[in-house]
Image (cartoon, rainbow, N blue to C red):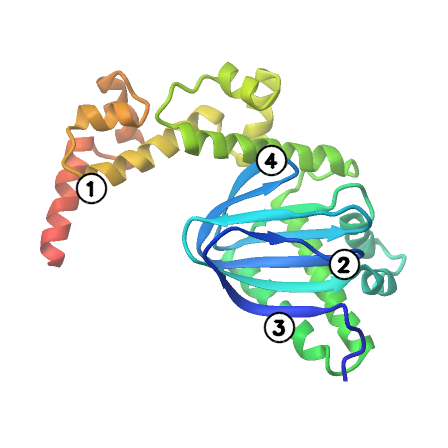
């Protein structure tokens, strides 16, 4: 028999249009993106997601919704559970403090990019929670406890700078995700640090420091990374002139584009296009 009516699990639900992740009052929702990509909105913030990303959000009293907008068909694995179960499984030892911080502070939303082995582990925990729902409440809660403990430890690994002040931690993460989304949507435009900072209402020096701490690379490097990735697609899939591709990707000075492209790929734009065409012919 099932011991509660406020737990549910949906495996590989496929979405092709915008949909909300909206836990019911006093419930939590864990969503794993198994395939696909897109963008999501949460409390006025826009960011991107792809396969391997994980969402955890809960609702105590006020509604809490993240709206996912797939660019391609997405498969999402969902697990909902009650905060009453979370309350019941927590003890007073140190490891449970990390779980408690996930649910009993002001922050009620978490977005992570998981490594493949972490994704596999979270999927296994989800399935175990499903299978244990029909056994006993005690066994189910033990499984849920193990999953949340693993999630909190993964959070600590992926975000080692997390402090007790969760609001600051999550605001830093959200800020950099917003910046990355802005860059991906506007990479063809002139993107100065001051302009980007103004768009997200941040101090330029603070934004530059936080972005590097969160992502491990300078903001300027990430901008070039996005631009070169798009240039590579255009070089391979279109017949456009290299000068036109450079300008379409935000580079108005061709020697600068050539230098940056070679730094990222190890070859010039012309050599890259030629190599991709040779590879394509040989595969045909």
Location of residue 213 in the rendering, given as x and y in whole percent from the top left corner: 58, 31
Give how far apart the Cα atoms at labels 1 and 4 are.
33 Å
Location of residue 28 in the rendering, given as x and y in whole percent from the top left corner: 73, 57
Q: Which residue has dot 1 on it?
A: 236
Q: Which residue has dot 4 on it?
A: 45
Of labels 3 and 1, earlier in sequence is 3
Circle 1 — which element? helix
Q: Are marks 3 and 1 in contact (CB under 8 Å)?
A: no
Q: Residue furthest right?
A: 92
Give how far apart the Cα atoms at labels 4 and 2 are.
22 Å
Query: Is 104 situated left or right of 63 in this image?
Result: right
Of labels 4 and 2, earlier in sequence is 2
Q: Which residue has dot 3 on it?
A: 127
Location of residue 206 in the rendering, given as x and y in whole percent from the top left corner: 62, 20
Of labels 1 and 4, earlier in sequence is 4
Give how far apart the Cα atoms at labels 4 and 3 are.
31 Å
Circle 4 — which element? strand
């Amino acid at each position: 028999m099932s011991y509660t009516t406020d737990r549910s699990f949906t495996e590989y639900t496929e979405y092709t249009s915008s949909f909300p992740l909206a836990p019911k009052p006093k419930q939590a929702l864990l969503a794993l993106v198994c395939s696909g990509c897109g963008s999501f909105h949460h409390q006025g913030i826009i960011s991107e997601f792809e396969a391997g990303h994980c969402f955890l959000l809960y609702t105590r009293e006020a509604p809490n919704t993240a709206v996912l907008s797939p660019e391609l068909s997405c498969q999402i694995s969902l697990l909902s559970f009650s905060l009453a179960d979370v309350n019941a499984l927590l003890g007073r030892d140190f490891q449970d403090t990390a779980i408690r911080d996930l649910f009993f502070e002001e922050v009620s939303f978490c977005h992570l990019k998981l490594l493949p082995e972490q994704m596999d582990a979270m999927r296994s925990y989800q399935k175990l929670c499903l299978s244990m729902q029909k056994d006993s409440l005690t066994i189910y809660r033990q499984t849920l406890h193990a999953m949340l403990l693993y999630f909190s430890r993964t959070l600590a690994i992926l975000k080692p700078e997390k402090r007790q002040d969760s609001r600051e931690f999550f605001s830093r993460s959200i800020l950099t995700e917003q910046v990355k989304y802005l860059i991906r949507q506007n990479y063809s435009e002139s993107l100065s640090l001051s302009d980007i900072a103004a768009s997200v209402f941040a101090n330029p020096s603070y934004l530059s420091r936080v972005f590097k701490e969160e992502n491990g690379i300078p903001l300027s490097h990430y901008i070039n990374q996005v631009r070169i990735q798009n240039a590579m697609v255009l070089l391979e899939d279109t017949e456009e002139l290299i000068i036109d591709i450079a300008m379409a990707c935000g580079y108005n000075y061709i020697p600068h584009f050539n230098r940056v492209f070679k730094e990222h790929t190890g070859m010039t734009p012309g050599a890259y296009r030629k190599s991709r065409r040779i590879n394509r012919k040989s595969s045909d």
